[in-house]
Amino acid sequence: MKKSTLTVLIIAAFAATLFAATPQVQQSEIAVQQVNQQPIVKKPVEIILPRITEITPFYDDCQLLFALKGKFLGQAQGTRAIRMKSATKTYYPQITSWTATRIDCRLTGDFELGRTYKVYVWDNATNKVITNQYDWTVMTELKLTHQGYTPGQVIAVSGCLLGTAQGMRRLIIGNTAAAVSQWTCEDIVFAVPNLLPKTYPLYLMDGRRIISNKITIQIN
């Protein structure tokens, strides 16, 4: 075979191979273009916001302590504070400990019992509320150890944050105000009113506001 003929055959074979590969290259380019043209779906960014979920009070002598529980509250207090806002005033509880899920506080000052407060975390660095506003009605706690009393019997009910003087406060049994002979921060001494034998609710009122939990008293 002549050299020129061999050269022609080699060129022809190379050309055939090139043309045969061209559709595959084109298909690959088309596939890449299709992938590039598909819309990119971005996942929404999840914004984690601090949230108050629960408030639990604890009564210690004449002090009201409470645990504020929640999520993403921050590992340390930093520039944050707890605020309690009523219809007329804003209070600043004393913070005793702070974690990401629990903040322990002591309520001091002339706060009003029987009021519903908006409780929230405030950031002093940004001057903004950074949590939800949690509704909490602040009450005092009454305890009555025994049951089964007779009208006229003088007994005592114990409690917390009762105040050092009675003032405008009343001890109510059923719908009747009891006659009080002694009133301290932790005890109220009173005479059982002359009521029919049965179980009655016992609670404190200040004006028209109920300011304590309701317990029961059995009158024989």
Image: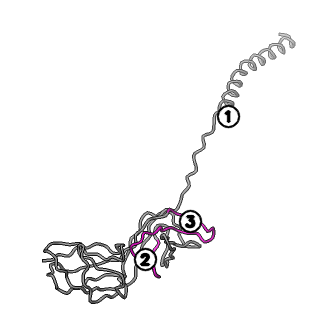
Name the amino acid type tagged 2: Glu
Mark 3 or mark 1, earlier in chain:
1
User: Which contiguous range is marked in magenta?
Assistant: 103-132
The answer to whether 101 appears left or right of 149 in the picture is right
**Residue marked by disc 2:** 112
Is residue 116 one of those drawn in magenta?
Answer: yes
* Residue assigned mark 3: 129
**Which callout, 3 or 1, points to the residue nearer the camera?**
3
Secondary-structure class at tag 1: helix
Number of the front mark, 2 or 1: 2
Q: Which residue is mark 1?
A: 36
Q: What separation in Å lies between label 3 and label 2 (alpha carbons)?
A: 23 Å
> Which amino acid, by three-letter code, is at mark 3?
Val
Contact, CB < 8 Å: mark 2 with mark 1?
A: no
**Residue 71: x, y in percent?**
48, 63
- Callout 3: SS: strand
